[in-house]
Structures are given as structure tokens and as C-alpha cells.
Amino acid sequence: MNKIDFENDEWLYEIKPKTSNFSLNLKEVWRYRDLLLLFVKRDIVTVYKQTILGPLWYFIQPLFTAITFTIIFNNVAGIETGSIPPFLFNLAGIIIWNYFTACLNETSDTFKKNANIFGKVYFPRVIMPMSIVITNLLKLGIQFLIFIGFYIFYLSKGLENTLSATILFFPLLVVIMGMLGLGLGMIISSMVTKYRDLTFLVSFGVQLLMYVSAVMYPMALIKEKLPQLGWIIEYNPLAYVVETSRFILLNEGTISISGLVYTVIVTILVFLFGLVIFNRTEKSFIDTV
């Protein structure tokens, strides 16, 4: 009988613990790219599958939010938006803000919601939050088309063209919002495995965060009217992204280079910290969920 030489055999795959908590393991993610696309398709199809209006909710939510903000903050509270129609001003802030909140809310429940899958099948766990970010990019694209539609409408009503070459930087703002939402979501999802109450606090906390992120008002207004609270806005990286996106789309507001640099630094730190916490939790979360 011939002796089998196992030492010289080359294994196709080798499953072993992560050697670094900072690793995204993109090579393995690429190997499972079909699964990633499957999760993206699942998220798009199943969310509104049994609803009456279906995908129309992608259109309805930002429109109703923009209308509500226009009535309450512009018509009642009297917040000025310069030469930009208040509805368009609010819509420009809402579409980028919705992308962040969708990434954060859906990622923050990753371990709890997918415990059954994680406990039975092996695949890179980071695929799940990555699929959420990609899915919400499609939603963002739909909502951006809504903005373009109303922008063209207001152009026909006499609005001066505000778009310029700076719109090429808009995708960078989307990347920042996606990374920030993903990083915070991974941190919260890891904590939810032990502290279930965080699930209920996230949606409430995001609503409060919106009011200090310059979504429905210019940053300069708060600094002028409420200087004692201006520091809250200045230290909020989300406010700089929202303000910059409105400047790029509507030429309204200002761009703070120092604020954007601060935002990029915070985003990278939050993302890396979230990745470390996520990778550490992945090894033992099944015992606590």
C-alpha cells in the first residue's frame, strides 16, 4: 500500500482565525462576491415585497420629509434659504442624510438579525454590512433622481443654474457618509449582542442627531442665532458633509476645508475602530446572541 503524502498537498481553502482585527480580508470577500450580490438582491426585493406601494416608498419618504421640513422650519419657524426654494434646500440635505441613517440603522442590527445564518454557514461576516451599504447606494441613486427632477422643475420656473464641476466631488461625500454609517453601525451591532436595549435607542438617537447635523438649516444660522450651541454643530462631522453637499448641489452655504479634513479623520478613526470591534465580536458573538 502506498503511503499518502499529506505534507505536500496544497489545500484549496484554509479556514483559520483572523490574525489581525484590522483586516477587511478583501481577497476572501471577492471570492464570495456572488453571495454579496445575493444579499443585495435580497435586501432590495424583500423590504417592500408585501407592501401595497412597494418601491414607491423610496420616492414617498424623502418627498414627505422635505414637505414637512418646509412647512415647519421654513414657513412656520421662518428659516431663510437664500435664493434657493426651501423645498429644494431641504431635499438636498435629506437625500445624503437618509443614506447615512439607512447604513447606520440597518448595520447596527447585523449580528442579532443574522444569528441563525452566522451560526450555520461560514462566509466573511463583513459581507453582511457591506451588502447593506451597497443596497442603500441604489436607494440613494433613486432619491438623487428625485432631486434632479425637482431641480429641473425649478430651473423652468426661473431658478439660476447652481450646478458646476464641483458636483464631481459629491461621490466623495457619499463615501464619507457610507464609511461613517458603516463604522458606527459595526460598533453598535457588536454592542447589541450583549446590550439589547441599544436597538431601541438607535432610532431615537438618530432622530436627535439629525437636529444637530444642519439637515434643515444652514450651519451659519445656528452660529448666528444660538452661538452658545454652535460648538455642537462645529464638532459634528455629519454637519460638514450635509452643508458641503448643499453647496455642491445648490451653491448655498459654505465649504469649510478644515471642517472636511476633521470629518475625514473622524470617519477613518470610527471606521477602523468599528472594524476592530466587529472582527473581535465575530469570534464569540454566537455564545451571547
Image (tube, rainbow, N blue to C red):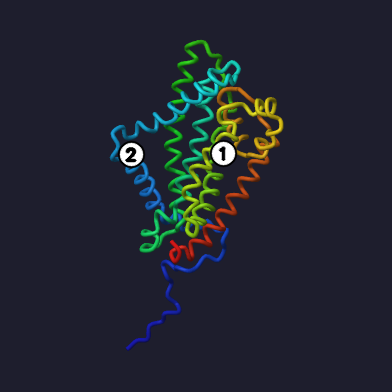
User: Element under label 1?
Assistant: helix
Cα–Cα span, label 1 and label 2:
26 Å
Q: Quadrant of residue 248?
A: top right
Counting from the top left corner in percent of width and height, residue 155 is at 50, 14
Relative to the observer, which residue lies in front, 56 or 151? Answer: 56
Indicate the amino acid at tag 2.
Answer: Tyr
| Marks 1 & 2, CB-CB < 8 Å contact | no
Q: Is residue 192 above or below residue 49?
A: below
Q: Who comes first in sequence, dot 1 or dot 2?
A: 2
Sort mark 2 into few (<14), some (14-19) or many (20+) by Cα contacts within 10 Å.
some
| Front tag of 1 and 2 | 1
Q: Nearer the viewer, residue 214 or 139?
A: 214
Residue 234 appears left or right of 78: right
Q: Determine the residue located farthest toward the top in the rendered image.
A: 158
Residue 14 falls in image quadrant: bottom left
Residue 145 in sight here? no
Q: In the rendered image, is residue 243 in sight?
A: yes
Question: Which residue position holds label 2?
Answer: 48
- Secondary structure of residue under mark 2: loop
Vertically, is 245 above or below 205?
above
Quarter of the rendering containing residue 19: bottom right
Q: Residue at x 43, y 27 (%)?
A: 64
The image shows residue 173 at horizontal and vertical percentages of 57, 36
Tally the numbered discs. 2
The residue beneath circle 1 is: 209
